[in-house]
Image: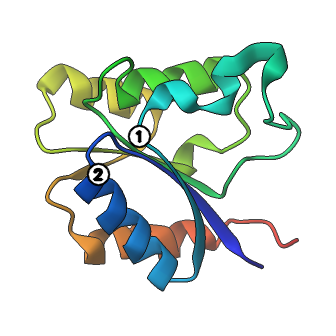
């Protein structure tokens, strides 16, 4: 099974480093520089099947122009996104207390920047155990 991940980050370096790490670990990676490109936001013009998840994992930066990562995940959850919440992560260099509370309420994983790739790898390994076989 080819593991798939979606990475959303407006910072080119962060998006590149995270996607490179994932590719080196066997993931097929789709990258976006903004959450507004999430297929779920395109309505009837969406290429999202809405029957199957667009990836096994969804990792997004929090502070981005247009829509922040926590709002993006909240909208996905309300819009029938098929990526399970426990497979979603928000990354930030500075979470506020309110943002941490919102992430906990949503049920997504949080990671601090700069990335601790060992920590991300450990989370991915744990979550991979619950991915259904093809």
Left or right, residue 98 beside residue 64: left
Residue 34 locus on image (x, y percent): 43, 33
Q: Helix, strand or loop at disc 1?
A: loop
Bin the neighbour count of mark 2 within 10 Å (Cα to Cα): few under 14, some 14-19, many 20 and up: few
**Structure colour scheme:** rainbow
Left or right, residue 8 beside residue 113: right
The numbered dot on residue 128 is: none
Tell me which label, 1 or 2, sits earlier in the chain: 2
Q: To which residue does mark 1 refer?
A: 33
Q: Residue at x 64, y 17 (%)?
A: 78
**Residues at marks 1 and 2 touching, judged by CB atoms closer than 8 Å:** yes
The quadrant in which residue 80 appears is top right
Q: CA distance from mark 1 to mark 2?
A: 8 Å
Task: State whether residue 113 is above or below residue 81.
Answer: below
Bin the neighbour count of mark 1 within 10 Å (Cα to Cα): few under 14, some 14-19, many 20 and up: some
Residue 8 locus on image (x, y percent): 43, 44
The quadrant in which residue 93 appears is top left
Q: Helix, strand or loop at disc 2?
A: helix
Task: State whether residue 113 is above or below residue 24.
Answer: above
Q: Residue at x 76, y 15 (%)?
A: 43
Q: Residue at x 20, y 20 (%)?
A: 98
Count every numbered label the image shows and give the total. 2
Quadrant of the rendering where the N terminus is positioned = bottom right
Residue 10 locus on image (x, y percent): 32, 39
Left or right, residue 74 beside residue 2: left
The numbered dot on residue 12 is: 2
């Amino acid at each position: 099974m080819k593991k798939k991940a979606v990475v959303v980050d407006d910072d080119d370096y962060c998006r590149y480093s995270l996607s490179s790490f994932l590719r080196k670990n066997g993931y097929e990676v789709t990258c976006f520089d903004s959450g507004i490109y999430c297929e779920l936001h395109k309505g009837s013009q969406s290429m999202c099947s809405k029957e199957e998840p667009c990836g096994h994992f969804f990792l997004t930066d929090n502070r981005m122009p247009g829509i922040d990562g926590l709002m993006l995940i909240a909208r996905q959850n309300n819009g029938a996104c098929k990526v399970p919440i426990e497979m979603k992560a928000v990354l930030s260099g500075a979470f506020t207390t309110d943002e941490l509370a919102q992430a906990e309420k949503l049920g997504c994983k949080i990671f601090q920047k700069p990335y601790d790739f060992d920590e991300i790898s450990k989370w991915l390994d744990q979550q991979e155990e619950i991915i259904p076989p093809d």
